[in-house]
Image: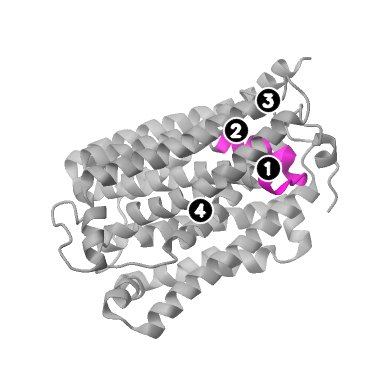
Amino acid sequence: MNHSATRERFALRLAPLLRQATIAAGVAAAVLIAGMFVAPERAWVSLWMGSFLLICLGLAGLFFVALQYASGAVWSIVLRRVGEAMSSALPAGAVGILLVLIAHPSLFPWYHHPVHTEGWAAFKHAWLSYPFFFARALIYIAVWLGFGWAIRRNSNRQDNESGPELSRRNTRLSVIFMVAFAFTFWLASTDWVMTLEPHWSSTIFGIYNFSGMFVAGVAALALVTIALRNVGPLRGTVTGAHFLDLGRLLVAFSTFWMYIWFSQYMLIWYTNFNEETAYMLLRSSHGWGKLFVLNVILNWGVPFLLLLPRANKKNPHTLAAGAVILLAGRIVDVYLLIAAPFSPQSPVPSVWDFAALVLVAGVFITLTFRTFFSSEPVPLGDPLLPESVHSHA
């Protein structure tokens, strides 16, 4: 049986799941569209949260692939196509981001009430002009999509043009991408999340968002990998050694997220400036306090204890449990980041929030698995593939 027929056979096993995911995404999109007429102030916020989550998952897949190329990692070669497939969520997330910016820019309080102050805040006023803001969004998205297209194209070409040359080309692209990514994601996080509260700022906000984005992305990658190993395409190539390394990444970046979270909180608490403490007071008091604590528990406390033992990292069941907890933690984190200023007294979860989550899950599952099955499950032309397959824990 040729490779194409084998891929089709495995794809058929997942066809019911993809059908359900597509239907769920369609229904959720219809609910959100209805919400834009019934409760526009809530539905647009929900769409913004969902779009940001989706674009972060796609970016995390691309960043994972670029990181492995740039670091010369061999163990992860068998996982490369999973990261590449995840990056297919990028365009869908970008559509949601641009839709909100075009159709409902008043989501941002500075759109109708520009910031009028002196000093550095005068720069903020210039920075938060809508044409410049929208142009920056286009640049961020174009950079990410361009690098993603180029890296995936070279990777797929390598299946037919075996040898190290395309790997070296992607390594160079990945190094450039990581530099560009550092600036664009930092600025995008500032633009798309921090400016929802334009009188507040944090110098480590971009790093905080990166840590949350990447740990959630690795969690999603681990879940997709486990599913593909169970279905068949990655059976025999992904082993306990690969799960162990994924578990190590989850523990390491979950702890890094906790470190950045504490650094930001501690500095704001210690300096006690009114313009800074308002941000934390909103999220740690009234009805938001429980989510504030839950955020730390889900993003670090429970997964750290669960995945710290070596055996638990190698076990696909406990690894999957840790990954699910971290993804739930990312949802809580993004909800605290974005929804809090729109409901300062207490969180008010709505059907629109639920619809946005279903839309994100449906789109991500559909695009990731369909993209994965459109090419070889592992990069057959990479000369280091055998070494990756036989990676030892």
In-image side of 56 versus 335 (left or right): right
User: Which residue does the numbered mark 3 point to in the structure image?
Assistant: 10
User: Which residue does the numbered mark 1 point to in the structure image?
Assistant: 69
> Nearer the viewer's eye, disc 3 or disc 2?
2
Residue 292 at what x, y percent from top left? 41, 70
Mark 1 and mark 2 residues within 8 Å of each other at the beta carbon:
yes
Mark 3 and mark 2 residues within 8 Å of each other at the beta carbon:
no
Residue 34 at what x, y percent from top left? 23, 37
For badge 2, the amino acid type reads Ile
For badge 3, the amino acid type reads Phe
Distance from disc 4 to disc 1, alpha carbons, whole Å, reads 19 Å
Q: Predominant secondary structure in magenta?
A: helix
Q: How many neighbours does mark 1 have within 10 angstroms: few (below 14), some (14-19), or many (20 or more)?
A: many
- Of mark 3 and mark 2, the one earlier in the sequence is 3
> Nearer the viewer's eye, disc 4 or disc 1?
1
Distance from disc 1 to disc 2, alpha carbons, whole Å, reads 10 Å
Give the magenta part as a residue range.
Answer: 68-86
- Of mark 3 and mark 4, the one earlier in the sequence is 3
- Residue placed at 57% from the left, 43% from the top? 176
Q: Is residue 370 above or below residue 290?
A: above
Q: Quadrant of residue 343?
A: bottom left
> Nearer the viewer's eye, disc 1 or disc 3?
1
Q: Is residue 316 above or below residue 116?
A: above
Residue 342 visible? The answer is no
Residue 363 at what x, y percent from top left? 46, 35
Q: What colour scheme governs how the chains and residues are painted in the rendered image of this protein?
A: one colour
User: Which residue does the numbered mark 2 point to in the structure image?
Assistant: 151
Residue 194 visible? The answer is yes
Q: Quadrant of residue 86?
A: top right
Distance from disc 1 to disc 3, alpha carbons, whole Å, reads 28 Å
For badge 4, the amino acid type reads Met
